[in-house]
Image (cartoon, rainbow, N blue to C red):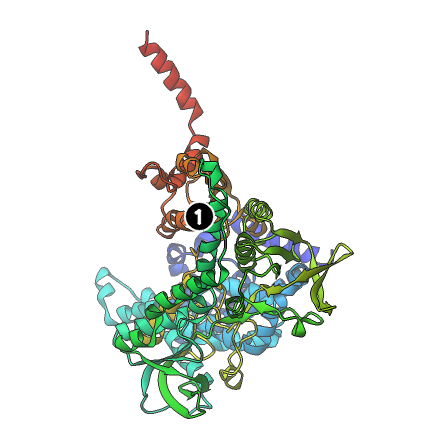
Amino acid sequence: MKRLPLLLLLITAVALFYASGAQRYLSLDGIKSVLAPLLAWREASPMAAAGAFFAVYVAVTALSLPGAGVLSLAGGAIFGLAWGVPLVWTAAGAGALLAFLVSRYLARDLVEARFGEQLRSINAGIAREGAAYLFTLRLVPVFPFFLINLLFGLTTMPARSFWLVSQVGMLPGSLVYVNAGRELASLQSLSGLLSPSLLASLALLGVFPLLASRAVRAWQRRRVYARFPRPRRFDRNLVVIGAGAAGLVSAYIAATVRAKVTLVETARMGGDCLNTGCVPSKALIHAARLAHARRGAERAGISAAAPTVDFPRVMARVREVIRRIEPHDSVERYTSLGVEVLSGHARLLDPWTVEIRDAQGELQRISTRSIVIATGAEPVVPDLPGIAGSGYVTSETLWDALSTLDTVPARVVVLGGGAIGVELAQALARLGSSVVLVESLPRVLAREDAEASALVAASLCADGVEVLTGTRAQRCLQEDGERFLETDSAGTTRRLAYDLLLCATGRRARLEGFGLEELGIPAARTIDTNEYLETLYPNIFAAGDVAGPFQLTHAAAHQAWYAVVNALFGQFRRFAADYRVIPRVSFCDPEVASVGLSEESAREAGVAVEITRYALDDLDRAIADDAAEGFVKVLTAPGRDRILGVTIVGAQAGELIATFVFAMRWNMGLGKILSTVHAYPTLAESAKYAAGEWRRARAPQGLLHWAERYHAWRRG
């Protein structure tokens, strides 16, 4: 309540400003209309005119009214360069400080009470780099002048620091604007538009943000690199650390544009995706689906004996699939492309030097203009009592463990109900294991649509997987030669005996041992990067799982393009990574594919959406293939066909999502999908029918009523 009088005073002042029509003077035309009397007043009473201008500028800025730029031009037009610059500069600083203090007094406590957790990390950054960040914003007007004042008032930056940095940062801009205003005021005729001084002033006004941006970047680079001697010559244009998806794509692109590039990998080419992730898991899932289809053949009128699983042959095929794909990611292929491939552990010694230690312990140092860190991620193992001696496996070590078995493991406990846990739990159950899936959250696939999650859970149960959601793992123990996972669910303790314990509780970025800490590169959960995938050092980039925010092979490859192009050609133009349309797929049965918003994420973000749902049990091909389980759910902007998100659950959902990904990427709505001819009968028709459902729900009923009457009249 103590803030209420000030708030009412500010609201009244702003209301009076607009009610009086004073806003019309905060435009070029408005200033021009009163310029003559203002010039006469300045001639007659220079001190009074200067004081009035100063007061008006401070008031407009303090009230966060639009027009500071126009007033800066007016200062040059009325007072010239000598008087105009100090007037505008000091008034802008004073007004900014007042707006900052008002924002802090009225809103900071309220914002902190509601968003304290989010502000904590922001304030930590402000304490560390706030002055440099504010200086950049003042020098390069990326955000409106008034917005900077209000937002910094919500932070913990001291008012003195805010004012001092603002004054220094606004001086170049004040000079440019006041000089442009002075030149415009001196214009006497149309021929004056071609005067060199006016053209130079207008050109400087236009290019100032660009020049200031480059100056700030140069200053930041000099500051961050100050303690490191820069090599005179470089051995390479690019060194890529890690030969997973992001690293391979980075090296490929660099070699394609004829850069001299070195790719360093500690373990196996292809990274996790080829050797322990996407490829082996999909090969195992394929075998499991064949076994499942054999069991379900009776539904199609085909008598078939229950399948016999020769597990060593299943695992042999998994290894064969890896071997067949390996050449795509091999040393030989990349060497033929012009990439130097080195086996060893890479470590950054300084922003331009990479040290590589090979298996024999020999060291090699390479100087390079740019570096891409693509070291990927590794499985997270929960810190449970007794887990160290439990014989657990992860998504990386599972394949070696399975390859030693003569039969499918009899009892499997899967810890984690994300995509990896769900996929492998279902595959092993279909191959004959007795599987229990333990998930601490209320549902499996918690990131996905709730309806999709429920369908997958039901499918898991139908395949014999016991799904325990809302259940926490407590400890691992051994008794009488048996191994157990002890769990707790709402106070009820249970022991789950297992032959194989699979920890699928997430993955974390590989950050240690690469020299990041020694160079001071911020890396908590992932390596901190800006929108251009630059780290603290503008010549060092990160891409893939180690950079986040996704842990998807295709997202890693997507990031790699931005990282390499910015690394090699950033001096000409930089590209901000575009994450607007990144699909993801869980390869369980039914598959779950999604892109953009889900119902839950839209609700949490406060985004208004309209939901269209098309059930696959209505689709002819799905019925014929005995794959009528699932749906297509499309979220659109209210009253428009613009697609904001899609979830597909069903057979080949990962293939079907591509239609919507393409449409979203190129801003095509449901109307375009509806007007596209789809082959019949195909599962792909589901996209068209979903678009048809959207159209049908928005049919113009009034117009259709008149159409009905028209046709009745035509019949006589």
Q: Is residue 98 visible?
A: no
Q: Position of residue 381 (x, y in %)?
A: 61, 70
Q: Is residue 447 left or right of residue 71?
A: right
Residue shown at 35%/41% (left/top)? 673
Question: Type of residue at label 1?
Answer: Ala
Q: Position of residue 102 (x, y in %)?
A: 62, 63
Per the image, the residue denoted by label 1 is: 653
In the foreground, 273 or 60 = 273
Instruction: From this view, report whether residue 12 is shown above or below residue 697.
Output: below
In the foreground, 710 or 444 = 444
**Circle 1 SS class:** helix
Residue shown at 47%/46% (left/top)? 294
The C terminus - image quarter:
top left
Q: Is residue 142 left or right of residue 411?
A: left
Residue shown at 33%/36% (left/top)? 680
Q: Position of residue 342 (x, y in %)?
A: 37, 83
Instruction: From this view, report whether residue 575 is shown above or below residue 268.
Output: above
In the foreground, 5 or 706 = 706
Residue shown at 39%/90% (left/top)? 365
Instruction: From this view, report whether residue 603 is shown above or below residue 483.
Output: above
Give the image quarter of residue 84. Answer: bottom left
Instruction: From this view, report whether residue 142 is shown above or below residue 527.
Output: above
The N terminus - image quarter:
bottom right
